[in-house]
Amino acid sequence: MLTCGLVGLPGSGKSTLFALLTGLHDVPPPGGSVEGRRVAVVPDRRLDLLAEHFRPKKTTHVQLEFVDIPGLMPGERSRTVHFLDAVRATDALVLVLRGFAHGPGGPGGQGADPLVELDTLEAELILADLAMVETRIERSGATAAVERVRDHLGEGRPFSDLALGPDERDALAHTSFLSAKPVVWVLNVAEGDLSPAPPAGTTGPVAGLKRAAQARGVPMVVVSAELEREIAGLGPDDAATFLADLGLGEPGTARLARAVYGSLGLISFFTTQGSEVRAWTVRRGTRVKEAAGKIHSDMERGFIRAEVISFDDYAAVAAGLAETGRPDAGRGPSSPGNRILVAAREKALVRLEGRDYEVRDGDIVSIRFNV
Ligand SMILES: Nc1nc2c(ncn2[C@@H]2O[C@H](COP(=O)(O)OP(=O)(O)OP(=O)(O)O)[C@@H](O)[C@H]2O)c(=O)[nH]1
Ligand SMILES: [Mg+2]
């Protein structure tokens, strides 16, 4: 399972978000020195719809592990070492930046400046990488690739911004840089500031951070962790109404999980056969024969072909049919889902794909195999 670290300065809302993501009832106390680690079920409305249609015995979502890393306090050496160790043990980082004002006495002053927080966090990661590279040069001498990295980091730029040639990449293949980790920026805003898209030309920290995210190609998500915790406490119907009133289609946790997936270069595909409807994770660009191996090694070994329909095509067919609400619909072949697939086949929307087909996000896949 992939591990995502929630990192930020004290009081940015990491623990609030952590509780939200992992379904924890009580928010861990501020400044906790022992980080929490919990598994989150990644919400996916597409999978929920499939489960509603196929009525499986079991529905299996994708899971991600989140770590609530205590806030970085620059200058406090032992805490920083602990922070960096915790960061090192993750696959991806969620940078939680404060976009709401703290009450009097809150950490870090009252006003929010997410760009400054971002700089502070990145600088710490870059400094740790720089120290590592310098140690390496002292111990085993400099190579052209390592010197380039050192100069780049020395300018205060993250490893992820450095374009390397194939030879340089090979030379550094066994070195892991903290500033190379896939990141998502989360701006945690006050309840009233949760508009999905501030008007173009807006200034201020939110717009500034958005521009920076676009310029650097980093996925960014705006949430209000506090508000979303309140929403999560409502029943599913009230929660949906509440989100719709805010102009949001889905909870921030779903948007965040998708952004983490994107930053890691991961996609989901779905299977609906048998008694389970399930989401699977593969790297973008994975061929279907290899993807089949995720489900079962026999499916990869004896792969013949895959039947594939995109989720969007499936949903369009479903919307055009009255099947889903039929009171007499059962499970298995007589489930609404299978009737939708039959209709989709008649419209030639179910494709037969060979072993080299690259699986796309949202594909509904059925593997034909023979062993
Ligand atoms: N207004 C507002 N306050 C929030 C929001 N999210 C968190 N807070 C408040 O900010 C304070 C800090 O939240 P935490 O989640 O504990 O922050 P943290 O990042 O875990 O802090 P440390 O563990 O000390 O690093 C709490 O008082 C929260 O109630 C939000 O979306 N809006
Ligand atoms: Mg905390």
Image (spheres, rainbow, N blue to C red):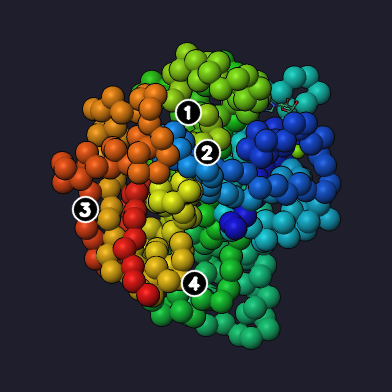
Q: Earlier in the sequence, mark 4 or mark 3?
A: 4
Query: Real-space Cα distance between discs 2 and 4?
Result: 41 Å
Across and down, in percent, residue 266 comes to 44, 54
Asked if residue 30 is positioned above or below residue 165 in the image, the reply reads above
Mark 4 or 1, closer to the camera: 1
Question: What residue did someone put label 1 on?
Answer: 250
Question: What residue did someone put label 4 on?
Answer: 148
Q: Earlier in the sequence, mark 1 or mark 3?
A: 1
Element at label 1:
loop
Other-residue count near label 2 (Cα within 10 Å), few / some / many at <14 / 14–19 / ≥20: many
**In the visual, does 309 lie left or right of 177?**
left
Residue at position x 46%, y 66% in the image: 296
* Residue type at the position of mark 3: Arg
Across and down, in percent, residue 313 comes to 25, 39
Element at label 2:
loop
Across and down, in percent, residue 357 comes to 27, 62
Question: What residue did someone put label 2 on?
Answer: 43
Mark 2 or 4, closer to the camera: 2
* Residue type at the position of mark 1: Glu
